[in-house]
Image (spheres, grey):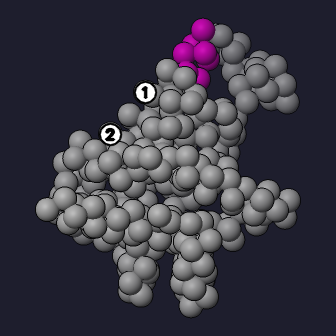
C-alpha cells in the first residue's frame, strides 16, 4: 500500500539533485501535449472542459465581423463569401491535421522519452538524453501506435460521458512508463497492463492529483508561469508511483506461484 507522502518524499529527494534538468524535461512534456494532469491543462481535461491550448488563437467572428472588417470585406467582395467560408474551413482542417500529426509523431515519442527520464531517475540514472531515445529506436512506430490508441480510446470514452473518460484516463495513465521499459509491446498489451496495474488505484490516483491542485493554483496566480515549476514535482511523483505499482504487481505474481 502506497501513500502520497511517501511518493512525494522520494520525488523531492530526486529533485533536490536534478531539479533544472527535470524542469526542462517536464516543460517539453507539457509543450508537446503529453501532460496527463487533469488540473494543469492535460489533454483529457482540455477535451472535457473545452479549454484552449497555449498558442495563437484566431477568432473567425473577429475576422468577418470585428477588427479585420476592412480586410475581410475586400476579401469577400473579391472572391465571394461562400469561397471565403470554404477556404477558412480548409485552412482550419489543414491546421488541425498539422497539430495532430505533430502530437502523434513528435509529441508521443517525446512524452514517452520524458517519462523514461523520470523513471530512470528512480534508480539514480536520470539523463536528459533519455528524452529522445524513441526516435532512434526500432520500436518508434510501435510506440507511436500505442500512444495513438491510448489517446483514441480515451477520446471515445469521453464522447460517452465526462466521467467515463476521466476514469479511463487514469486506467491508461501508466502506458508511457510501460513503453519506456518495454517499447516493443503491442498496443493492446500495453494498455491491458496499465489497466491491470491501476485496478483499484484510480481513486487514490485522483486524490494524488488533487494534492497538487493547490500548487497549480498558486502557480497560475504567478502570471501562469508558476505551473511550469510544479510540473517536475508532479512527473517525478508519478514515476515513483509507477515504480511502486509495478513492484507490487510483480510481488503479487511471485506470491501466486
Decide whether residue 126 is among the magenta residues: no
Q: Which residue is mark 1?
A: 156
Which element is circle 1 on? helix
Q: Residues within 10 Å of mark 2 (few under 14, many from 20)?
A: some
Q: Position of residue 12 (x, y in %)?
A: 61, 80
Q: Position of residue 173 (x, y in %)?
A: 44, 51
Q: Position of residue 157 (x, y in %)?
A: 45, 28
Q: Is residue 66 above or below residue 250?
A: above
Residue 11 quadrant: bottom right
Q: Residue at x 56, y 66 (%)?
A: 3
Left/right placement of residue 62 relative to residue 242 reads right
User: Residue 43 or 168: which is nearer the viewer?
Assistant: 168
Which element is circle 2 on? helix
Q: Earlier in the sequence, mark 2 or mark 1?
A: 2
Q: Position of residue 196 (x, y in %)?
A: 32, 48
Q: Which residue is mark 2?
A: 149
> Magenta residues, as a range?
82-91
Mark yes or no: residue 141 visible. no
Question: Which mark identifies residue 135?
Answer: none
Amino acid at each position: 500500500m502506497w501513500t502520497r507522502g511517501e511518493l512525494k518524499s522520494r520525488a523531492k529527494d530526486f529533485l533536490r539533485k536534478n531539479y533544472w534538468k527535470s524542469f526542462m524535461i517536464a516543460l517539453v512534456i507539457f509543450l508537446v501535449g503529453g501532460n496527463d494532469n487533469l488540473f494543469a491543462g492535460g489533454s483529457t481535461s482540455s477535451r472535457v472542459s473545452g479549454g484552449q491550448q497555449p498558442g495563437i488563437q484566431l477568432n473567425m467572428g473577429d475576422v468577418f465581423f470585428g477588427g479585420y472588417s476592412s480586410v475581410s470585406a475586400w476579401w469577400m467582395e473579391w472572391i465571394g463569401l461562400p469561397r471565403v467560408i470554404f477556404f477558412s474551413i480548409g485552412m482550419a482542417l489543414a491546421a488541425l491535421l498539422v497539430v495532430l500529426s505533430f502530437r502523434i509523431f513528435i509529441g508521443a515519442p517525446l512524452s514517452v522519452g520524458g517519462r523514461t527520464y523520470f523513471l530512470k531517475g528512480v534508480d539514480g540514472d536520470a539523463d536528459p538524453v533519455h528524452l529522445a531515445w524513441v526516435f532512434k529506436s526500432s520500436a518508434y512506430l510501435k510506440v507511436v501506435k500505442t500512444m495513438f490508441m491510448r489517446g483514441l480510446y480515451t477520446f471515445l470514452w469521453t464522447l460517452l460521458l465526462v466521467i467515463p473518460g476521466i476514469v479511463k484516463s487514469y486506467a491508461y495513465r501508466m502506458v508511457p512508463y510501460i513503453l519506456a521499459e518495454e517499447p516493443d509491446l503491442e498496443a493492446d498489451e500495453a494498455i491491458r497492463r496499465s489497466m491491470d496495474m491501476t485496478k483499484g488505484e484510480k481513486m487514490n490516483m485522483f486524490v494524488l492529483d488533487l494534492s497538487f491542485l493547490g500548487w497549480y493554483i498558486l502557480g497560475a496566480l504567478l502570471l501562469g508561469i508558476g505551473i511550469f515549476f510544479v510540473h517536475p514535482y508532479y512527473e517525478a511523483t508519478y514515476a515513483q508511483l509507477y515504480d511502486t505499482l509495478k513492484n507490487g504487481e510483480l510481488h503479487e505474481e511471485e506470491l501466486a506461484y
